[in-house]
Image (tube, grey):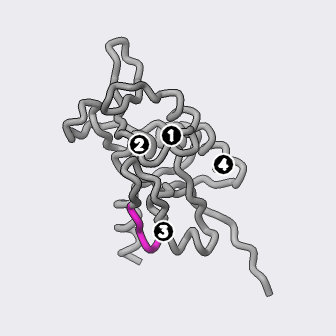
Amino acid sequence: MNKTVTPEYIVSACLSGEKCRYDGESNTIDAIVKMVNEGTAIALCPEVMGGLPTPRIPCEIKKNQDGTLSIINKNNNNHTEAFIRGAELALDAAVRAGITKAILKQRSPSCGCGLIYDGTFSGKLIEGNGITAELFIKSGIKVITEIEFEKLHDDC
């Protein structure tokens, strides 16, 4: 008897072993790989979905003087449109699959939740969310970081 598995989570693809980080590496977490393999999670990378290559020059969110946000890379090239496009495509995938929970990579300009880099490429963290995480949260998707997931998973 085949049991149909319904995905419960969207996860950052780098957490599932995909080498899609800016440096061409991953942040593999075995329990998340297992979830994707079992069909309880869908892995995606909003940055790649938005059209950015892998590897790519690191990007951070920068607050402009007028209060708006831009996503710039270390060479000061603006990639805001690609990040927004990727976030919208990721949200569309979650909505189509009926998913209301996400496990996203902390500190990322796309997926970061709670803390992100400050836009100076100095390693300084500030309160805030990445573009995809913010869109998910505003759309009613519960977002946790991989660190929060590991703490919950370790307690099981």
Q: How much space separates mark 1 and mark 2, taking CA atoms?
A: 7 Å
Tell me the crowding category of disc 2: few under 14, some 14 to 19, or many 20 or more residues within 10 angstroms, Cα based: some
Q: Earlier in the sequence, mark 3 or mark 1?
A: 3
Magenta residues span 27-31
Q: Which mark is drawn over residue 93?
A: 4
- Asked if labels 1 and 3 touch by Cβ distance under 8 angstroms, the answer is no
Q: Are marks 1 and 2 in contact (CB under 8 Å)?
A: yes
Answer with the quarter of the image where residue 73 lies. top left
Q: Is residue 30 magenta?
A: yes
Magenta span contains residue 93: no
Distance from label 3 to label 1 (Cα)?
Answer: 24 Å
Label 3 – label 4 distance at C-alpha: 18 Å
Foreground disc of the pair 2, 4: 2
Closer mark to the observer between disc 4 and disc 1: 1
Q: How many marks?
A: 4
Label 4, residues with CA under 10 Å away: few <14, some 14-19, many ≥20: some
Mark 1 — residue? 52
